[in-house]
Image (cartoon, rainbow, N blue to C red):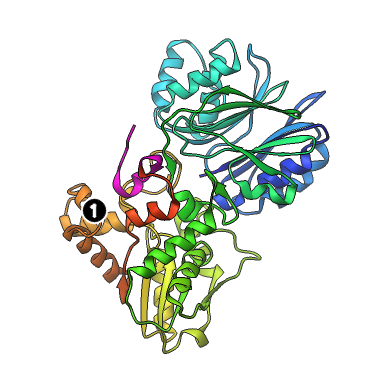
């Protein structure tokens, strides 16, 4: 998915920029990047961080980075930040999202005899594409509006200029941006968990399509937010860090409510509840708080040397990481009936291996309660699972086995409680060798988040699109 962080300060901003960007590493990364502006110009640093941590790669660069303004990125796709020379002046840019009409925009640019320089692997860098759209107009504000109106999909961005930083939320607000402040500095972030330890307080949640311009003295609204929003619901279920807030709603609190809803609808007899670490833990705590039964950790993560499993782009490496970092405790498993809460079941291959380990260690029953409905549709607004086929989703594989043609009756399978939905879940349960499998109802998930359904993007579960 990726995340961005920017800061404008009356003093050197590099420390805040470095740690603020690092606090986005949980989002799943391919590359990281920093860019700063000072009296001598722009300086940037970009590293591949698939096989190492952001801090390890960037700490050696810090002595060469100085300035009062800077932007940073954790990118799951392209190399960023870019430094662009244009008639608007030199500027730096980072983006988060997914542009679905890249080829269409590129063809239009080609007809105008424009060119692209960032062509790694023969693919146009989408951030450069956004910079081109901005540079077509006579001001940054007009250029940003041009990009917002042209892009189909989702694109939030930070633009580092000579005078300050533009913070721009995508048109329908699928990716959040929040402004924080402390004495002598303002910052913009995808994840509010970046603020507390750096001394920032949340000052403003940008609305959908809103544009603000930050300086060290404050910020000015350049475009009012639109009245239509579809923020990604998966942020609260899985992507978001527990300490982060979106739209003023805390991630961990929502996960407790998700677990509580799962428990209210459940009557299974078990010995204890566990969470698949880490993002399943909050859901499991909510479950046991509602049920009043024990919580235990039959799986623990070994994190000193193993990064997050979805970070590497190669699926076999992801599976290896997932297996090696999760260690089972036989003494807690043997002879027990265990219920696990999980954030979601995407492909199910890693989970299948974990379940087999539980049986190998003597578990009598293994029950699974994912905190969201079955993933059926591909995400069109973020790069989630961009390197994987939608047909690899556990739900789609089950549908394909049931129908012969995967694309048939998808809406029926997405409808909670329908006969086809039950058949799909049963097929997944059999594949994973679970004693029972019950997914979260979408209505309960919406209630747990606390926003109206039409303000949430739930496309990956029900293909809904209001605008």
Between 324 and 301, which is closer to the camera in this rendering?
Answer: 301
> Which residue is tagged 1?
415
Q: Residue at x 72, y 40 (%)?
A: 17
Q: Residue at x 44, y 21 (%)?
A: 149
How far across and down, in percent of the image, does residue 64 sit?
A: 81, 37
How far across and down, in percent of the image, does residue 333 sit?
A: 46, 84
- Residue 271 as seen in the image, left or right of residue 435: right
Q: Residue at x 42, y 11 (%)?
A: 111
Q: Residue at x 21, y 50 (%)?
A: 406
Question: What secondary structure is found at the residue carrying circle 1?
Answer: loop
Between 350 and 463, which is closer to the camera in this rendering?
Answer: 463
Between 137 and 249, which is closer to the camera in this rendering?
Answer: 249
Q: How many marks?
A: 1
Residue 249 included in the magenta stretch of the image: no
Q: Quadrant of residue 46?
A: top right
Give the quadrant of the C terminus.
Answer: top left
Between 275 and 91, which is closer to the camera in this rendering?
Answer: 275
Residue 458 included in the magenta stretch of the image: yes
- Residue 65 as seen in the image, left or right of residue 464: right
Q: Which residues are magenta?
A: 454-467
Q: Residues within 10 Å of mark 1 (few under 14, many from 20)?
A: some
- Compared to 356, does 149 lie above or below? above
- Compared to 340, does 170 lie above or below? above
Residue 398 in sight: yes
How far across and down, in percent of the image, does residue 381 sit?
A: 42, 38
């Amino acid at each position: 998915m990726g995340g961005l962080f920017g800061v404008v300060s009356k003093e050197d901003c590099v420390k805040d920029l470095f740690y603020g960007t690092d606090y986005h590493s949980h989002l799943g990364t391919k590359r990281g990047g920093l860019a700063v502006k000072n009296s001598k110009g722009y300086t940037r640093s970009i590293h591949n961080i698939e096989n190492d941590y952001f801090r390890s790669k960037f700490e050696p660069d810090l002595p060469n980075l100085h300035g009062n303004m800077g932007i940073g990125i954790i990118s799951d796709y392209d190399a960023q930040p870019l430094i662009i020379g244009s008639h608007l002046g030199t500027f730096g840019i980072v983006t988060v999202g997914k542009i679905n009409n890249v080829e269409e925009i590129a063809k239009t640019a080609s007809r105008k005899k424009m060119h692209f320089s960032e062509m790694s692997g023969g693919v146009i860098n989408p951030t450069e594409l956004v910079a081109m759209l901005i540079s077509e107009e006579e001001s940054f504000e007009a250029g940003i509006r041009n990009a917002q109106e042209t892009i189909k999909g989702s694109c939030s961005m930070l633009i580092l200029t000579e005078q300050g930083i533009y913070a721009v939320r995508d048109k329908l607000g699928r990716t959040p941006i929040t402004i924080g402040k402390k004495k002598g500095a303002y910052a913009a972030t995808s994840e509010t968990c970046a603020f507390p330890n750096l001394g920032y307080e949340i000052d403003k949640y940008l609305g959908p399509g809103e544009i603000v311009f930050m300086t060290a003295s404050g910020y000015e609204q350049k475009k009012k937010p639109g009245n239509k929003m579809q923020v990604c619901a998966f942020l609260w279920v899985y992507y978001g860090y527990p300490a982060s807030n979106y739209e003023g709603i805390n991630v961990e609190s929502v996960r407790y409510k998700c677990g509580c809803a799962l428990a209210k609808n459940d009557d299974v007899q078990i010995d204890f509840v566990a969470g698949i670490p880490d993002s399943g833990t909050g859901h499991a705590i909510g479950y046991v708080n509602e049920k009043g039964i024990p919580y235990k950790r039959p799986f623990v993560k070994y994190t000193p040397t193993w990064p997050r499993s979805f970070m590497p782009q190669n699926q076999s490496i992801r599976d290896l990481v997932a297996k090696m970092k999760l260690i089972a405790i036989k003494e807690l498993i043997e002879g027990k009936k265990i219920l696990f809460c999980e954030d979601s079941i995407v492909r199910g291959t890693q989970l299948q291996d974990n379940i087999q380990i539980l049986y190998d260690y003597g578990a009598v029953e293994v029950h699974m309660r994912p905190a969201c409905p079955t993933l059926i549709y591909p995400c069109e607004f973020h790069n989630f699972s961009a390197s994987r086929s939608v047909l690899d989703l556990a739900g789609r594989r089950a549908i394909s086995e049931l129908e012969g043609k995967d694309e048939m009756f998808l809406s029926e399978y997405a409808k909670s409680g329908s006969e086809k939905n039950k058949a799909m879940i049963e097929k997944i349960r059999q594949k994973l060798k679970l004693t029972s499998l019950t997914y979260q109802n979408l209505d309960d998930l919406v209630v747990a988040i606390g926003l109206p359904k039409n303000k949430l993007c739930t496309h990956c579960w029900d293909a809904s699109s209001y605008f």
